[in-house]
Image (cartoon, coloured by chain):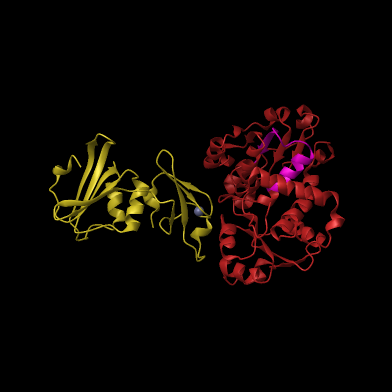
Chain colours: A yellow, B red
Amino acid sequence: MERELRVRPIKDGTVIDHVKAGQALNVLRILGIKPGSKEIVSIVMNVPSKKMGKKDIVKVENRELREEEVAQISLISPEATINIIRNYEVVEKYKVTPPEYVIGMLKCPNVNCISNTSEPVESKFMVTRENGIKLRCYYCERVLSENIADHLL
Amino acid sequence: MNFKNRDILSTRDLTREEIDYILNTAEKFDKNPQEFSDLLKGRILALVFYEPSTRTRISFETAMKKLGGEVISLGAVEASSIAKGENLSDTIRIVSSYADAIVLRHPKDGASKLAAEVSPVPVINGGDGAGHHPTQTLLDLYTMRKENKLEGVRIALVGDLKYGRTVHSLIYALTFYSAKITLVAPEELSMPRDIIEDIKRIGGDIEETSDLKEVIPEVDVLYMTRIQKERFPDPNEYRKVAGIYRLTPELLESAKEDMIIMHPLPRVDEIDPRVDETPQAKYFEQAKNGIPVRMAILSLVMGAL
Ligand SMILES: [Zn+2]
């Protein structure tokens, strides 16, 4: 968080650091933050980073993330770190880890997939990491590796 | 090797050893079918077909009857509850309480995986969407092996490689046998990128062309496919590519003498009927091989062997 001082420190909340450059707005989407939301949010985009070249940072005040939200962030930004802040202190810091599979989280891009019908079934993707995240639909085997955020349910 | 209660959904779930085991079993049935005429006595196979496919249906039905078993089948789509909007999951749950195994054919990709999740009895994928059709693949492999053209074979897959489910299934299995694969298709019908990448990643030898004539002298197996009108969202797109490959005796003049021609059937006009008389034509033989292969699969998943 070497560049954290670009925006003011937060008292309580979550700092999502090492977000893949360009994905900050998708992180907000995952967190359900949109115009009209009451959370206090700061975003920094395209900050130089030793590790990543460029990165984004998202800070959300008075909010800790649910497991499912962290899993979704890991899909669009597998290097992200989550810092939980309480009373200006980082009380917990961890790197996201993409789950082995995700259920009911994304819509299969294949319109002819059985998971896109009225059948009582949730979408299911196997997650693999090879030059970024690759998701394979359990049902139709279609692979999703680009613009993953666009397929989040 | 134990196949009892196993679903047969995709050739990708099978190892080379398992495929060989199924083919060896098929060979036994092929040689002495009468020895096994009571093997599945008292067992019931359900055929659940949401798409017309006379060939696959009667091939399974024949295989089951040759083993002494019974067949129940969901009648024409319009006449059954499918037309009334009952979902696949419910239909499978009900049918699986009547039968010892289910063969499913369905227009949606991945439908057989869903069926297998809800069914306590083994589900055999009889073709789902543009996805897999493993029993067709197994009979294709069986045909090639019978003709001594499997290990290290040079094979061309020709025609609709985009929508054609038989080739999607076949191509994965061919890599087990170190096949050299040439894909012959117009750009509009080329093999999906992710499949080609998958095959290359597992070390498959694969190249692409759109010229049928140039590959004919090179190959041991010419695997022709039908360009399926019903898979095209746009009829104009279909007209652009319909009839693009037509195999004639003249084209075959440059072929190796012992080359074999395969086709999952039915054909439209991609194989001239005059080709039927050539020694290379093996597609009717291939269809016939569906019986011992399906007998093997049914006996194995029902645990009768
Ligand atoms: Zn899918």
Residue nearest the observer in this picture, B265 or A50: A50
The location of residue B294, given as percent across then percent down, is: 74, 54
To which quarter of the image does residue B35 belong? Answer: bottom right
Residue A90, percent from left and from top: 19, 50
Does residue B140 show up magenta in the picture? yes
The answer to whether B99 is drawn above or below residue A70 in the figure is below
How many labels sit on residues? 0
Q: Position of residue A123 (x, y in %)?
A: 47, 58
Along the line of sight, which residue is nearer the eye, B301 or A92?
A92
Furthest residue toward front? B1
Towards the viewer: B117 or B218: B117
Residue B264 showing in the rendered view? no
Farthest-out residue, left: A8
Taking the spot 60% from the left edge, 65% from the top edge, the residue there is B119
Residue in front for this viewpoint, B168 or B299: B299
**Which corner quadrant holds the C terminus of chain B?**
bottom right
- Asked if residue B219 lies left or right of residue B68, the reply is left
**Residue shown at the point (31%, 55%) measured from the top left:** A30
- Residue B160 picture quarter: top right
In this picture, residue B207 sits left or right of residue A110: right
The quarter holding residue B191 reads top right
Residue B222 seen = yes
Placement of B82 over or under B287, stated as above or below: below
Q: Could you tell me residue B95's position as x and y percent?
A: 65, 69
Residue under the image location 58 percent in, 50 percent down: B232
Query: Taking B73 as reference, is A130 left or right?
Result: left
Q: Which residues are magenta?
A: B137-160
Is residue A56 rendered magenta in the image?
Answer: no
